[in-house]
Amino acid sequence: MPTRVPSTHGCSLLLLALLSACLVSATAAPAPVSFRAEIAPILLEQCETCHGAAEQKGGYRLDTFDFLSRNEDPSDPALVAGKPERSRLYTSLVTDELDERMPKKAPKLPAQQAELVKRWIAEGAAFDGSEATASLIEIVPARTHPKAPEVYAQPLPVTALAFSPDGSELFAGGLRELTVWNPATGALVRRIGNVAPRTFTIAFAPDGQKLAVASGAPGEYGELRLFEPKTGALLSQLLSSTDAVLGVDFSPSGELLATAGADHSLSIFETAAGLRRHRLPVHSDAVTAVAFSPDGTKVASVGLDRGAKVFDVATGKLAGIYREHQAPLYAVAFTPDGTQILSAGRDKAVHQWTIADGKKARELGGQGDVLKLLVSKDQTYLAGSGGKLVQAAVADLKLARSIEGARDWIYSMAIHPATQRIATGCYDGTVMVWNLADGKLATSFCASPGYSTKTAAAK
Amino acid sequence: MKMLSALLCLLSFAASPLLRGEQAESEKPAVPLEHVQVGSPVKIEVVPAAVKMSTPLHKVQLVVTGFYADGSVQDLTRVAQLKAGASGILRLEGALLLPVADGNTELTVQVGDLQQRLPVLVSGQRTPEQISFQYGALAALSKNGCNSGGCHGAPSGKGGFALSMVAFDPEADKITLTRDFLNRRINLPEPESSLLLRKPLMQVAHRGGLKLKKEDESYQLLLNWIQQGCKFDPENAPKLTGIKVGPAVRRTLKWPAHTQQLRVTADFSDGSQKDITQLAMYSSSEESLASVNGNGLVVGAGRGQVGISVRFLDNVETCYLTFVRDMPGFEWKAPAPANYVDNLVFDRLKLLHYLPSDTCTDEEFLRRASQDVTGLLPTVETTKAFLADTRPDKRAALVDSLLAGPDFARFWAFKWGDLLRLSPTAVSEPGTHKYHAWLVKAWEDNLPYDRFARELLTTQGSTLENPQAGFFRTTTNTSEATEMTAQIFLGARVQCAKCHNHPFERWTQDNYYGLGAFFERVQRRKGVRADETLIFLARRGEITQPRTGRTMKPWAPGTGEIQLPPDADRLTAFADWLTSPMNPFFAKVEVNRMWWQLLGRGIVEPIDDFRESNPPTNPALLDALAADFVEHKFDRRHILRTILNSRTYQASSRPNEFNRTDEKNFSHAQQNILTAEQLLDAVCQVTGTPERFGNLPLGTPATQLPAPQPNNTFLSAFGQPTRQSSCACERQGQPSLTQALQLSNSQTVESRLKNGGGKFLKDMAAQNKTDEEMISHLYLAALCRYPKEIELTKAKAYLAASADRGSGIEDIAWSVLNLREFVFRH
């Protein structure tokens, strides 16, 4: 026994030492790498452009976990759980062979990113998303956006405008924020944060309780978020995509919502459930605008592919197509009776065409590139590169009124018939509010908080 | 035609690294830099002599040159020691000076014992520099290849982002960069987040790869331009008037001196000048001779002259450098020069340390000259007589007799048929014959080339009566007429400039339509008679530049706009300008074409791609030939005779130890495969069995056809062009398996040899030839030489062993027709 005691003692000491070492390392060891939170963002940022849904260089795609882990070529597997050195996904990031290294024609990935991928594979390459076949962009956690700049160094072009249902507030797209203004005085009322860098369309739900924001960082990602307009609280994120979301429109009942994206996508969502009802792969380039018909049964879309199309909301089937445009399109609206479409873009003419036969009924030219058009009652209002706000009756599409004053391209427009106001947002950062009745300028302000031409001149 | 020219345009893009947007990737020299051996310069020169830097981004490149007692020069920029008198005023990156703070100082440049001092004045460092849209932002995008033809400068851009090629349309680029696609590419409040910067930095995945680094001047320019609010240049801003490249004189550098730092400056309309060495774009006319990096450092690797084309927006200048190197064991020796051609070629070879090959044998000369001048092999009788002739001037006599014969005129008319695109589809079947007959007559009469060109360019009326009016009949519109005229008579491929400024030459879109103004009034109307077209000039009609919408006045390269009365005959005006003895292109293009036809390679190559950035390999030779041509009143036979009589033309195709690597300086003859038509004629001549072409008289050689034969498999296998384009490149010389099969195993050859040797053997038998005579005859006919002893012995033995004489000679003839010696010109 005496011989055993020290040995037992020694043993237990050793055990204790090991145990404590274990405990120490357990507290110091980082949590397991999360695929959806840490790996998927890297893949989306660095790889998805060439190995995604649109293009599969080398026959490989990784835009879903399912594709990523398929190992189509067993002799050269992309992913071997636990074995980073045998997984192309990792080895191609760190090799010094320029022909082999990913991303191509680019410097090596930062070491900590490659290290994350290595650890994730070493830890078993677990998938912590909802569905392996869901695209990566849909499983990454929603972003929290940094605060908007307190003071804008230069004015931001105003690419989105919307009146609150009662007309008392005017919402504008800012940099990582929405700014809310008093349309009568031009005073800044409040700022709503946690928005993607740029906003391209703001739409109020018919009940006025929700605000849909089509936004994104162009070329990087897109988001469709719903906010509570008064408090600015983020209600939900319906869509996360690989390029900016450019357009959004609610159905008249507010039950549905259609989105248009720079990633060529056109989708219809159920607003409350946040479920995607249709994904319509019908444009071959960015979809720039989308609109519901007055009766809510159809959706119209236009895009940079020069296409103008109409779909049946219930079936998602094509209900009309128009092929006369010769340039990228930016604006679309239904006529009040829902049988015709007004569409326009860089071919400097608004075309009015009949959904049933895709034939042109009339056109209004000579207004420069048209970037926005809307229909209110029996009138259409349009604006764009000409810097003018142009009004025409839907019935004859003859130029009724042309309001000049903006000093640069007009990107956005909003109308509030009850208060007789129409607002335009300009490249130079100004918002102009006009009296609908006499076309006079009611107020004008720079929608970039903190920026004024005076401070710029002083600088 | 349209598709082909578009293709040519695209092909020339593909050829240039500049256009593939790889400028940034070619920073490191392909050849290791040799240590500079300073030696004992008698003088050093520093350019510029005084340095002024007046804005924060104003950099200045110094170039230091050493002058030596033996008259040689070398670039010492790499080893010069630079030292600023006062500190904190400027910063040095090698011989690149960067401003730091306002002040005056002196810079000392020292090489060995020699020293030079330059005054340095730095100013304007406290005021932020306003970045020009054109000369800053667009220049930066150009420098990095963003708007190159393979990237966003492609007609439809890349990834939905389309810029104008090398910024030729700044107005469109303004919109694209700032306003288009909902202001997608610029973030004004946070400039560094702009997609325009994040993409080339690869902060956002960019299919074009990493194109910009934050420390690059280009990045600074773009970032500052955005920070300053993406301002466009005001109307009254100084305009770029031109660029200058130093060294301005043609410099010869002798190994181990093999590098040259260039210095590029831009001149502006307000009289100011700016160093743009870092912003200019560089490309080498011959990468194997010298490469150039993005900082303007030229590194020579071979021997010969290279043109470094320097581009800044629309401005292109070329710097010429000749690299020479002493070859160990090289000792000059050459045949006695026959005329000025040899003197000038030998001067070049001596300078570059290439040794000319010996003169070719009489047999080689006879075969080569006959085929080059007439397209045909000499008859066995001619060969025997020539070989037996002992007169010392028999080669010159042969040249004279070849040039005087009818086959010469018909063969050269046929060559011009390729250029002028004579074909039934273009000018109808009878029209082709008439036009061809006109060309034959022009060559028979030795019509001076200026009158030849004038006839083609100014003849109006019915193509039945004036077949040369077919020149405009082969084109259907102004663009085609402009492009064809430029390609044939100016040696210029202007197609690219139709849609955008030429990517590596001065040709702008304005120039294209300005040249087109000469041809805009040409009318082509169907005549009342069958196959008749009427060519005439409308009284009025102006051409519009489609991008600017401006009406273009007639414009000619090197001359500019030509003022003409409104109803002037513009074709005559063009012909007057073109054929003037002072015209810098006209004579050169034609002598170069004749040189190419005889030597197999142009002094300028390709022959229809004359541009400053594609210099001649021997400028003195091209100048002398052109001067001789003008002096002899555009007598083409005189030039051909001069070349044919030169030792250079008569050089052997066997290289020696000191010219094996030379392909451009005419140290030895080129071995080229015979053209499709020459080869078919040779087969017909040797076998004594002509080919039938449609309803042309039997015996018409393929080298004298008025139009291509569409259904002749032999001719198409060997690259007979269909005459869709005026480009010499349409004739394909690429060897192929089909060609080998045609020679070894085709109906064309077999039908002429089978059944006991066909007509050839029957003729021999009729003349009671012995085996030996028959074999000799075969060799003389096919190769212009007697068989060697061993060839004769083997052939005789083979004949003796054959079951019958017929199949024996058939086999021997077959093997002779498959000899490289038969198939090639050598």
Image (spheres, grey):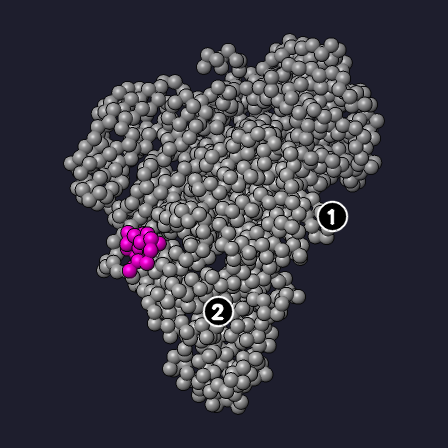
Contact between marks 2 and 1 (CB within 8 A): the answer is no
Q: Nearer the viewer, mark 2 or mark 1?
A: 1
Q: Which residue is mark 1?
A: B528
Distance from label 2 to label 1 (Cα)? 44 Å
Residue B260: image x %, image y %? 31, 41
Residue A218: image x %, image y %? 58, 32
Q: Is residue B665 above or below residue A294?
A: below
Amino acid at pointer 2: Leu
Amino acid at pointer 1: Val
Q: Residues within 10 Å of mark 1 (few under 14, many from 20)?
A: few
Q: Residue furthest left?
A: B113
Tag of residue A272: none
Question: A162 or B276: nearer the eye?
Answer: B276
- Say what secondary structure mark 2 lies in: loop
Tag of residue B377: 2
Instruction: Say which residue appears at 40% left-offset and 27% top-offset.
Output: B267
Which quadrant of the view contains residue B567?
A: top right
Instruction: Say which residue appears at 58% left-offset and 43% top-offset.
Output: B458
Q: Is residue A260 above or below residue B736?
A: above
- Say what secondary structure mark 1 lies in: loop
User: Is residue B294 visible from the viewing direction of this image?
Assistant: yes
| Boundaries of the magenta span | B336-355
Question: B419 or B413: nearer the eye?
Answer: B413
Residue B269 lies in magenta, yes or no?
no
Q: Residues within 10 Å of mark 2 (few under 14, many from 20)?
A: many
Instruction: Say which residue appears at 57% left-offset and 80% top-offset.
Output: B758
